[in-house]
Image (cartoon, rainbow, N blue to C red):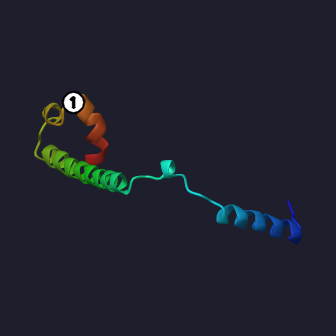
Amino acid sequence: MPRTVEEILQHADELAERFESYEPNPADELDPGAVTLLRAAVAERSEAERHLLEAVRAAREAGMPWSAIGSFVGTSGEAARQRYGKKVA
């Protein structure tokens, strides 16, 4: 939808006014300490999942059955195979 130059300038003025009069709501702000902890935890979980995949791959290469792997990761052998089977193949 084509707009005139005047409409574009008016819209720009409205946006500038909204920006200049913006007052942040402290309730909307995220706690930087909590954000830092969450980011670190996600990175650690990702690294732990990579490490687990490597361990499952090594266990399968060593001939360990899915039932034994499942017991180590806290699931049934079938659940372990479904979760990790395609990732370690």
> Where on the picture, by quarter, is residue 75?
top left
> Where on the picture, by quarter, is residue 18?
bottom right
Tell me where residue 37 appears, x and y as whole percent: 30, 53
Left or right of 28 on screen, residue 9? right
The residue lying toward the viewer, choosing from 84 and 63, is: 84
**What secondary structure is marked by label 1?**
loop
Q: Is residue 77 above or below residue 58?
A: above
Q: Is residue 86 above or below residue 6?
A: above
Tell me where residue 74 appears, x and y as whole percent: 18, 32
Q: Is residue 60 above or below residue 37?
A: above
Left or right of 34 on screen, residue 59? left
> Where on the picture, by quarter, is residue 84?
top left
Name which residue lies at 14% across and 31% down.
71
Q: Is residue 26 above or below residue 70?
A: below
Please rate how many residues cluster around mark 1, counting C-alpha atoms within 10 Å: few if below 14, some from 14 to 19, many from 20. Answer: some
The residue lying toward the viewer, choosing from 56 and 89, is: 56
Tell me where residue 89 appears, x and y as whole percent: 26, 47
Name which residue lies at 27% across and 40% down.
85
Amino acid carrying mark 1 in the image: Thr
Q: Is residue 89 visible?
A: no
The residue lying toward the viewer, choosing from 82 and 7, is: 7
Left or right of 78 on screen, residue 5? right
Q: Quadrant of the N terminus?
A: bottom right
Tell me where residue 35 appears, x and y as whole percent: 37, 54
Q: Is residue 50 visible?
A: yes
Name which residue lies at 54% across and 52% down.
25
Left or right of 6 on screen, residue 50? left
Q: Which residue is mark 1?
A: 75
